[in-house]
Image: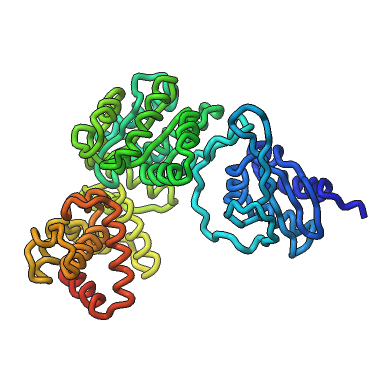
Amino acid sequence: MGITAQSVWDNCLSFIKDNIQPQAYKTWFEPIQAVKLTDNALSIQVPSKFFYEWLEEHYVKILKVSLTKELGKDAKLLYVIKMENTYGNKQPFTEKIPSSNRSTSVKTQNVDFSIKNKNPELKNPFVIPGIRNVKVESQLNPNYSFENFLEGDSNRLGRNAGLAVAAKPGGTSFNPLLIFGGVGLGKTHLAHAIGVDIKDKHPEKTVLYISAEKFTQQYIDSVKKNNRNDFIHFYQIIDVLIIDDVQFLSGKSGTQDVFFHIFNHLHQNGKQVILTSDKAPVDMQDIEQRLLSRFKWGLSAELQTPDFETRVSILKNKLYRDGVEMPEDIVDYVAKNIKSNVRELEGAIISLIAQSSFNKKEINLDLARTIVEKFVKNTKREVSIDYIQKVVSDYFQMDVDTLQSKTRKRHIVQARQLAMFFAKKLTKASLASIGSQIGKRDHATVLHACKTVDNLSSTDKQFKKYVEDITKKLTV
């Protein structure tokens, strides 16, 4: 028959090569070697444990399809992991791991492709031993571009600084570039736009966009897995690092410490750092002074609430991009009455178009008034965390000080958890901010509180009634 491990793998590779980007193929498939074919199980050798995890996380579907074509529906894939140890004697360490089995057992088991995490999280892409020029997926959203980030007095400084950085990343005095401002004013959009423009003008640069929350989670995982150095080394090879919502690092001393070292390395090597935050450095709490001083090294550009003319331009641009025509007086009416942020402005226009098409109503001023009233009412209705604590305390007949206290009495703990749950549900505050306002707790306590409330609501009828009663009081 002449079927060998090599011939099967060659056929798989030709299929894979036709279906993925050339750079990805070169990075992730060329280093693999076919080792052995036993019945319907193909063994392949990969350079490292991380390499195996990356394949399993990102390419398991294409591997499954290609191998099934060659060996039938019962095809199995086994990985042989060959790692050079760090002592320089080049003695390889070999370990067999079956496809889709995350354990590091040295035993070879036949595990088929079907055992797979359906919603894989993006793995932290650590540096891979033996491979240079690792392809890093930038995580940028190409829809967020400078073309649809309209300039006005409210954002001119930030936008122009962004354009300067995109033209010469790491080569301007805007390093780091910190973009700050309230909710829905375009911080994330601008950060992505800079990254997208850099990728376009400097395709050789490694750009990475990541939220501070995900960065923190990756760091925690690296500590658990004892590969903190790999985490640091990976981030030190990035040319343009974009970290969104950097205020999320508040109170996380370990993450701040590691970010401090990464930041210093990037800055000293002429790499560009772009940060977004909901507040200026001077207003950031629980961020170490040495980090705050570095945030101030470059430029801090504030995005403010857009003025009337800018709001009109944003709406017209949105309508133009969506191919929708709307009378000038209606655009003006919406722009005049929704002033809080760009997100709500665009949301109102989308609602207007939807109402018109679904209910076959003409887009006129009456319809616009109805939609805008709802938006303005909902915007005003956003309750404060203080108000939530008062409502919950009154409901359980206790004062706010008791709710915030350190006591572990069950009914007080539940009241506190409910306050945190509603603060997360009804405000735009971060978990850290909610925790600090409700008894100086950390974000993990808030997360635990929300999960507890969700669980108790579905298992405890009395608790479910608490949630329903307080919901009515807060949303009237």
Camera-nearest residue between 304 and 466: 466
> In the figure, residue 175 lies in which quadrant?
top left
Camera-nearest residue between 381 and 91: 91
In the displayed structure image, the side of residue 201 where residue 176 appears, left or right: left
Q: What's the colour scheme?
A: rainbow
Is residue 103 something that shows in the picture? yes
Q: Residue at x 58, y 54 (%)?
A: 103
In the displayed structure image, the side of residue 18 where residue 158 appears, left or right: left
Q: Residue at x 61, y 63 (%)?
A: 115
332 over 117 or under it: above or below: above
Q: How many marks?
A: 0
Q: Residue furthest right?
A: 1
Looking at the picture, how far across and down is residue 155, in whole percent? Answer: 28, 34
Is residue 196 something that shows in the picture? no
Looking at the picture, how far across and down is residue 431, in whole percent? Answer: 27, 52
367 over 203 or under it: above or below: below
Looking at the picture, how far across and down is residue 466, in whole percent? Answer: 20, 74
Q: Residue at x 21, y 70 (%)?
A: 471
In the displayed structure image, the side of residue 125 where residue 456 appears, left or right: left
Camera-nearest residue between 209 and 457: 457
Viewport quadrant of the C terminus: bottom left
Looking at the picture, how far across and down is residue 359, in whole percent? Answer: 36, 70
> In the figure, residue 113 lies in which quadrant?
bottom right
Q: Residue furthest bottom?
A: 461
Viewport quadrant of the N terminus: bottom right
Camera-nearest residue between 182 and 136: 136
291 over 101 or under it: above or below: above
